[in-house]
Amino acid sequence: MKTFSYVNATNEKEAVAALSPSTRDGHGDALAAARSGHQPSKVPIAGGMDLLGLMKDYIVSPDRVVSIKGLDQTIASGDGGLRIGAAVKIADLAEHAAARKMYPALVTAAEGVGTPQIRNMGTVGGNIMQRPRCWYFRNEEFNCLKKGGSRCFAVDGENQFHAIFGDGPCHIVHPSSLAVPVIAYGGRFRVAGPNGAREIDAGEFFQMPNANLYGENVLQPNEIVTHVILPAPGQRSASYEVRFKQSHDWPLAAASVNLVMSGSTVKSARIVMGAVAPIPWRVQAAERMLAGKTITEGVATDVANAAVAGARPMTGNQYKIQIARTAVKRAVLAAGRA
Amino acid sequence: MDNGSRIPASGSRQVAEVQAPARPPQHEKYPWPEKSRLLGTRVSRIDGPMKVSGRAKYSYDIVRPGMLYGRILRSPHAHARLKSIDASAAEKAPGVKALLITIKPGEKVMFPGEEIGALAAATEQQAADALRMIKVEWEVLPALANVEQAMRPEAPQVFTPANTRRGTAQEDGDLAAGFKSAAFTVEGTYSTQVQTHTSLETHGCVCEWNGDNLTAWVSTQAVHGTREGFAQGLKIPQANVRVITEFMGGGFGSKFGPDMQGLLCARLAKAANAPVKLMLDRKEEHLATGNRPSAFAKVKAGVSADGKLTAFDATTWGTGGAGAGSDYPLPYIYVFPNRRRMHTDVYINSGQQRAMRAPGHPQGCFVTEVLMDELADQVRMDPMEFRLKNLPPLAPNAMWAKYFPMGAERINWKSRHVTGDPTPGPIKRGLGCSANRWGGAGTGARAHCEIASDGSVVMRCGTQDIGTGNRTIMAMVVAETLGLEVPQITIELGDSHHPFAPGSGGSTTAAAVMPAMRVTAGKARDALFERIAPQLGVAATEINIGVGEVHVVSPSTPDSSASGQTASRSGQAPILRRVAWRDACKMLGTVPVSVDGQWERGLSAGGTSGVQFAEVEVDIETGITKVKKIVCVQDCGLVVDLKTAETQCHGGIISGVNYGVFEERILDRNTANMVNPNMEWYHMAGQSDIPEIDVVLVDTPERGVIGIGEPPAVATAAAVANAIRNATGVTLRNIPITPDKLLTELERAGGTN
């Protein structure tokens, strides 16, 4: 990896300042550069689970790495929900008593991340901010669209693990397991930047490639996610992941379901799929179908069919539709049983 | 190979299957003991504590004073001609001490990852950064990314004289008559993927020159072969080269010589006048250090109404990469009285194949065994009964007819349903079986043994322990022969300064080295007796080995042979006097016993057989297969260490599960670049993916020692594939059986919901 300088930020202000372009850079130029395919020259690091790989593979080569692992690492109750510091380790989230009780869909997703080592080092914020695992993006030989190249190699190449939703031009699947249930729970991200802090609805945070080809979300290079804020959950919720390997693998498809119940009837639902699109993929048509229903195998099957109805597979990933369908069906049934 | 290409037209020298008589006559002087004290028991690896505590130093761990770090410059293209190369910036980069360019403008590269240069710098990071400063301009040429592309009539001619090389037809019996007598036939195209070795320790070495003498710490399966390779490649005498491999982290057939990276490392060390470490990274491993070739077989086979195989006709092909072969044994094991087979090697622009754990056998096994299940269904026979009906006759190296029922018992074959689990719900359970064979003979190992006056025993042998437990079983044989315990034996191996032993390939090591241990330790024991006999006041023939002591026995022992001390005599004669081992050795004074010995006939054999059974659960709504259990019934002649023999089976079975379900080298079809040169998308079983493994080792001590490294890896994938077929009712003739393939077939059969 390229030689870099290291800044240990002890608070948000320091972190944002260290990530901001210096006056010498010409304010704003770095931001503009990042939007045009150039990787930012200053990047935050927490657990480093993703960033170090990107740097070793020369996919990103920052001049400065800013440690934000010392920022808020607590999980606090408030407003009927939880406020989770972005620097909380994934393993700590998975073991947190209140989180386990209130947000089973999130805990299931956290337990499925990577390996014990990755969960012990990796943070909640890092999981949300990690870059795609697309093998064309990750291999230096392929100068793909996302890296400023002229084509997406997946289109007529090896796309068995790519997106079945979205119109391109880039066909990654979003790699975050935690973002999927966070959106299902109606969560928000607190973001700190040069103009102070703001909150962004998690459902509005991620961006499709036609809106942002070189990044995956609305963050500016000098902004950081500091907290995940979860409102009170519905009475029932669950996640289901389908993985090729049971140890250390990415989901082929995942689904999180959050249900507000009235007795045994679903009052309203949120259904979000993971690993099927460039962003966590919420399916409102399927959500509406669930409202007013009692959960049965038949209802779950209909909802699952509706969830994948709009899928547009590539040349080699048609099979993922069936897997996504199964993930939704099983998440709905699991939530129904919860 | 075309003009300008720099790689040889065939694969590197390989160690393959070695056959020998299945049951040799017994060694006269040092036969294996009739009743063993240690052999066949479970002994834990003597180097286990060192390995798990990190004290064992692998080539990767070697650090020498002033050592530099080397990196190799490789082609990013599958097929390209060099236009220009400019290394001037790299040469001046911080820390760079030596730089070599091994390609000239106009020359071609034939696969991504082909070596074109190397440099050494003071730190790993400086080396990696400097490498990127070398400016290379290429004329990118048309490349072949898979066999379909290479075999198209309109394919560009990338290889000379052609992209394919057709072999000669092998034919036996009367094919037409065979098909005429068939009541049913099965036709299909079967295929297996390219699998890379993925050794946990990557290839590489540390090279250090002292004047004209080279010492190399190499991750290799052959210290002597690698010494020869360095000498040839560097044009220096073998006498000037020493190769050391004290601990080694896996090779599986891919590490028999210095390879390009070893020679480049030695040249960098010479140029920089400093030791250089050059270990490859995971990506380089996948691209350029060997693989198991793919295999394709278009087969038509016939079976009579009463379940006898009648005919087998196959057109086969496969690729071993850029200019390397891809042949494999077919049909495998079962008796097809009339058969024909024609194989074609197909060349593509990828790294060349190398021997990989039972080269060819898993491919031939998969094709034949899946076909066998399909044929059994045609005649409505239980697949195991069908196999029993078509096996070669029982022989010491052909014991399948006995082993199949043993395995069936352990997997509860009685519970097997016919093809397609009728149980409602998405989870379908299935059972499958398959058989394997291998040679596993070995010869040629030499050894030197010393017994010192304090009772220490040192055995030196220029073999290597590539992770198999060789060091442990060597100590067991020496301890058994000298009446000592394993910790009392010092084994020195992995050094080309030690007496010659062959490379560890083809499962030959145990069969080559254990006889040398037995003979050399036996000779040392005889020499000890000769030396101490005068002080004991008896004839050497009146001394025997006890446990931790030597015995003076009655001279009237009935079975005294000319030389006396046969192992079988031990303990039979009346003991007149007991002398502790240390006291006996004390009589040696300052001059130790020091003897040479070597492999001799009568202590080892060749030819193993085994069967495996698989139990799987397939989720037909996701296409995910969970291998629940593998039963392995396997022989390897005389079992030296039951524990390490079983763990060889565990390792082989895990690699077989990977071959059947997970592993696949995936090349981008448009550029021939590998998209999964890592351990993230190159899927391999993790802890939760590994099944319960039940190993039944059949001890046949009368046959002598036979190797077991490769046989257990052969049959697993086929057994798993057959179990998946039994579970789901759909036939997949292609491994790995991934969710996409399974769901596609299930959907075709209308069965995903």
Image (spheres, rainbow, N blue to C red):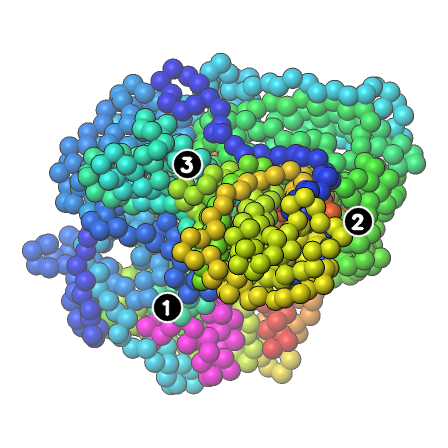
Task: Look at 36% across and 61% down and name the residue there.
Answer: A49
Q: Do the dots labelled 3 and 1 sit on one chain?
A: no
Residue nearest the observer in this picture, B276 or B288: B276
Disc 1 chain ID = A
Relative horizontal placement of residue A187, taking residue B420 as reference (left or right): left
- Residue designated by label 2: B404
**Comes first in the chain, label 2 or label 3:** 3
Q: Identify the element where label 2 is drawn.
A: helix
Q: Dot 3 corresponds to which residue?
A: B226
The residue under label 3 is which amino acid type?
Answer: Thr
Residue B287 is left or right of residue B334, and the answer is left
Q: Which residues are magenta?
A: A85-113
Horizontal and vertical percent position of residue B412? 80, 59
> Dividing the picture into quarters, in which one does residue A302 lie?
bottom right
Q: What residue does disc 1 label?
A: A121
Vertical order, A212 against B18 (above or below): below
